[in-house]
Amino acid sequence: MKVLIVGSGGREHAIATSVAKSPRVDKIYCAPGNAGIGQLAECVPIGAMEFDKIVTFAKENAIDLTIVGMDDPLVGGLVDELEKEGLRAFGPRKNAAILEGSKAFSKDLMKKYNIPTAAYENFDNPDEALAYLETATFPIVLKADGLALGKGVLICNTLEEAKEGVKSIMMDKAFGTAGNRMVIEEFMTGREVSVLSYVDGKTIKTMTSAQDHKRAMDGDQGLNTGGMGTFSPSPFYTAEVDEFCKKYIYQATVDAMAAEGREFKGIIFFGLMLTPNGPRVLEYNARFGDPEAQVVLPRMKNDIIEVLEACIDGKLDEVDLQFEDNAAVCVVLASDGYPVKYDKGLEIRGLENFTDKDGYYCFHAGTKLDGDKIVTNGGRVLGVTAKGATLQEARANAYAATEWVDFDNKYMRHDIGKAIDEA
Ligand code: AMP
Ligand code: GLY
């Protein structure tokens, strides 16, 4: 079969790597892809938001399955556009991707269906938000309603900071139209865990857990980023936590979406916080996490195509989802200055060191071909992933492998997976 993947980051490279292992797949295309994906797939110069071009390409090339990796095209309705033309696509339709696309929607859903999350209020009007803050307790959390590249969340310690936050989100539109509405919610404490799951509209099967590191600098300092590294599984995701989430969160979310007439087929990513009062949902995403996909997918034993097709066909109950009994760690190599300002176009050396190294992966996040060289083309450049029998071993392997590649301005956190030692 012929598969088209939509997206251009480390997540899409991880998806492509899994798809390439499927004996059912003859040819992979990626729109727009990157230099690493280009080693497995034919990259086509079509942007992820160019829906007409994607649909035309899929029709003309008789694509059997399109996998939409990124949030923007999902929230914008790319799956609906493909289905209208009779094409098969993996990912939620627009009316279900709203689970990620609107935080106000997801909070209201959780409240209506008693899914545990932080207490909150939604606001359409900045004056009302400012008035609400006068009697609030601090710290408090402000969230732009819409998609904001993972940056639309502000944790404010004082009333002054929070007022500035409301101004920046709702009045100055720091995150564009994502800030037309806003959620103000209770500040929670605890460890964070990401649990990704496959969903077919009725059945949900969770994947092995993972933990991201969102801040740019060691010790969880600095600005929020798309994610600087991950490990899987999370030792803090115990059987007890799993049992609680199965009882109150996972199936409840799928059933809630179905009850709202928004049947969800695709990936639900549960961003959880393990608070002293039990697990709470921090956020939902409607796609694989990035870099979570880079540690979760390499550990999945199933043929990914069979799992994705089972989701589309409502047959996920027939799939025996299995993960390897090992661990993986991903360290993101970024360009120094990310997430604010950084250079692009710097030559990357040493990529060949990953060829034929079992259990090691160099997923490309922001790279492109420049003549016969591969150069940096984004803030997050590479995701170096290694497996190990234990988390400690995987971490040592991943950090050793970060030395195999080099580019000017190479930057990474040195404490990815440090939390493992506290487990
Ligand atoms: P989100 O995009 O909603 O996951 O938020 C980004 C990050 O902000 C999360 O990973 C948390 O570290 C933090 N965060 C979000 N909501 C809360 C909350 N209610 N309490 C404490 N931290 C939060
Ligand atoms: N790593 C977090 C995300 O993909 O949203």
Image: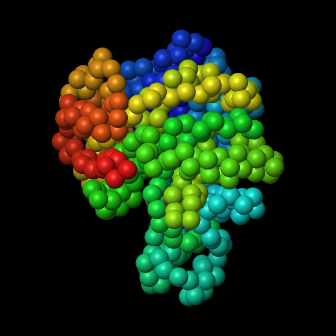
With 104 as the anchor, is 407 left or right in this view?
left
The colour scheme is: rainbow
Residue drawn at x 61%, y 43% is: 268
58, 213: nearer the viewer: 213
| Viewer can see residue 120 | yes
Above or below, comparing residue 241 to residue 386 in the picture: below
Residue drawn at x 56%, y 49% is: 240
252, 124: nearer the viewer: 252
Residue drawn at x 68%, y 53% is: 248
Give the percent coordinates (x, y) of residue 364. 36, 33
Give the percent coordinates (x, y) of residue 159. 47, 84
Above or below, comparing residue 51 to residue 260 in the picture: above
349, 266: nearer the viewer: 266
Image quadrant holding the N terminus, namely top right
| Viewer can see residue 180 | no
Above or below, comparing residue 114 to residue 196 in the picture: below
Residue drawn at x 64%, y 31% is: 90
Give the percent coordinates (x, y) of residue 122. 65, 71
